[in-house]
Every structure is written in C-alpha cells, then in structure tokens.
Amino acid sequence: MSESGRVLRQALALGTLALVIAALVHLPLIKRFVRGEFRESFFQASEYPGIRLITVEEAEDLWRTAQAAIIDARRTSVYAEGHVPGALSVPASEDRKALPANVLNSPRAGILVVYCEGGDCQSSLLLAKRLHDEGFKDIRVMTGGWEAWKTAGLPEERSDGQE
C-alpha cells in the first residue's frame, strides 16, 4: 500500500470520527430540528419579501435620521430596563394578541426596524413575520439585537425616562 493511500484512509477515518462525535454532541439539537421546532425561526425570502436583516450600524443610521419606527420585540419588563430611545414595545411572546394601535396606524410602506435580545433570540423574526402578515412592506430585523446595540455604546432609554 502506498504512503498516499494510507494518508487518505487516515484522513477519511478522522473525518468520519469527527462527524460521529459532532452528531453525538448535538443530538438533542438534531432531534429538535427533526421535530420541526425551528421552522418558525426561519423564513423564505420569497414568502416574506418585505423582511430583510440589517446590522446594528444600519439600524443606528435609520434611528438617528428618524427614517424608521423602531420596535422592541422583547418582554415588557425587559424593555423597561433599557431599550433603543423612542422604540415601541411590542412583545412578540404575548399570545399573538392584536398589535398596538400605534403600530397598526403606521404607514404600511414605512420602514420598521425590529429587534430582540440578540444572540439566538428569534422573537424579532417572529414579530417581523407578523408585521408582514399585517401588510407592512419594509421590515428590517436588526441582527445582534439589544446586545449589539449596547455593545456598540449607543444611547439607551428606560421606561421611567432615565437615560
């Protein structure tokens, strides 16, 4: 057997071992995926043409120039602790009850920027889908969410009016 054949077999064996170990480590996640638990967390651009992902820098620009309504999809209690100044609180987790009048009365063609906690939070995407279903045409989801906003050192506001 040639040296290159032996090296190739070893590389294939290592690759296979790595795949098996990765599957075992992530087995609970794989099971959740197979059960369809993540289906709501993703969207097809063709189904939701008005939704797109933006960076915290793009969101800041839209906020500073007042070109968009900013919507916080986190729980009300978390919103009260700190949020983007002027952001509307529309918790995505609240029983799909009717959207607040101040959101529903917004122009459907206006820009909406939606954010949540950050990290693996999916509530901003879920709320964006809801807003799309209500007829809003330009919805932008800030990737990184509130954590990215704070990390960037951008202004914060609290519900009690303190900065």
Image (cartoon, rainbow, N blue to C red):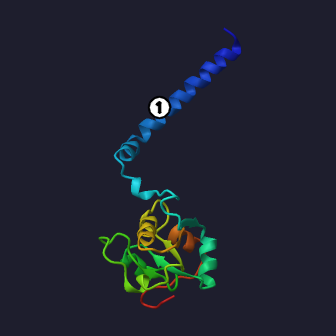
Residue farthest toward the right in the current orientation of the protein: 3
Query: Residue shown at 58%/71% (left/top)?
Result: 151
- The answer to whether residue 17 shows anywhere in this view is yes
- Residue 134 position (above or below residue 49): below
Residue 154: % across, % down: 59, 78
Q: Which quarter of the picture shows residue 13?
A: top right
Q: Which quarter of the picture shows residue 72?
A: bottom left
- The answer to whether residue 152 shows anywhere in this view is no
Three-letter code for the amino acid on which mark 1 is drawn: Val
Q: Which quarter of the picture shows residue 89?
A: bottom left
Q: Of 61 and 103, which appears nearest the observer? A: 103
- Residue 48 position (above or below residue 70): above
Query: Residue shown at 60%/21% (left/top)?
Result: 10
Residue 6: % across, % down: 64, 15
Residue 128: % across, % down: 46, 69
Residue beneath label 1, please? 20
Mark 1: secondary structure? helix
Left or right of 26 in this view: 141: right
Q: Of 79 and 60, which appears nearest the observer? A: 60
- Residue 27 position (above or below residue 120): above
Left or right of 5 in this view: 42: left
Query: Residue shown at 46%/91% (left/top)?
Result: 161
Badge 1 local density, few (<14 within 10 Å), some, or many (20+)? few
- Residue 47 position (above or below residue 94): above
